[in-house]
Image (cartoon, helix red, strand yellow):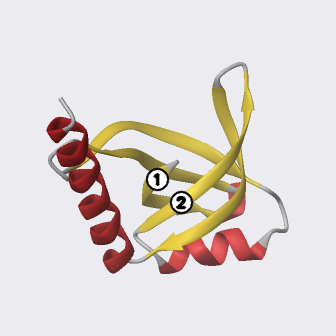
Amino acid sequence: MLVKVNHLQESENKVSVTLLDIDDLGSVVPMKDLVLNVLPYDDSIIDKMKTSNHVMIFTEDIDNNPTTIISAINFTDEELNNEKERMIKAVNKESSNF
């Protein structure tokens, strides 16, 4: 999941994020706000949440409800822009095939 980090509650091992999507025009669209748990004692996830506005996260999924972040990857502004460009190209390619 691509998310924007809103607030980190380190003492509670929780993070408030906004789930993001990239639409067909390459716009970043906020989908919904989530409060997720962070694995206790996993400083690497907490550090990534502190140092980046956008993060690709992987969660435990219990009954279609993401609850705990098990891995995170920083997503730079440049990487976000590259992903937006890929989405636009994919939509344009799909449109031209019809």
Q: Which disc is residue 84 wearing?
A: none
Q: Quadrant of the C terminus?
A: top left
Residue of label 2:
56
Quadrant of residue 23 within the rendered picture = top left
- Compared with 68, 79 (above or below) is below
Q: Is residue 26 left or right of residue 52?
A: left
Q: Is residue 85 left or right of residue 43?
A: left
Residue 94, how many percent across, how many down?
25, 39
Residue 47's place in the image compared with 3, above or below, is below
The furthest residue to the front: 97
Residue 57 x %, y %: 60, 55
**Residue 21 x %, y %:** 34, 44
Label 1, label 2: how far apart the Cα atoms are: 5 Å
Tag 1 near tag 2, CB within 8 Å: yes
Circle 1 residue: 2
Q: Residue at x 23, y 47 (%)?
A: 93
Against 84, residue 27 (above or below) is above
Disc 1 marks a residue whose amino acid type is: Leu
Q: Secondary structure at mark 2?
A: strand
**Amino acid type indicated by mark 2:** Met
Disc 1 residue crowd, few under 14, some 14–19, many 20+, Cα 10 Å: many
Residue drawn where x is 31% and y is 70% of the image: 82
Q: Secondary structure at mark 1?
A: strand
Q: Residues within 10 Å of mark 2 (few under 14, many from 20)?
A: some
Percent position (x, y) of residue 48? 59, 75
Q: Quadrant of residue 31?
A: top left
Residue depicted at x 24% and y 63%: 85
Tell me the residue at 53%/75% (across/down): 50
Q: How many marks?
A: 2
Q: Sequence-wise, which precedes: disc 1 or disc 2?
A: 1
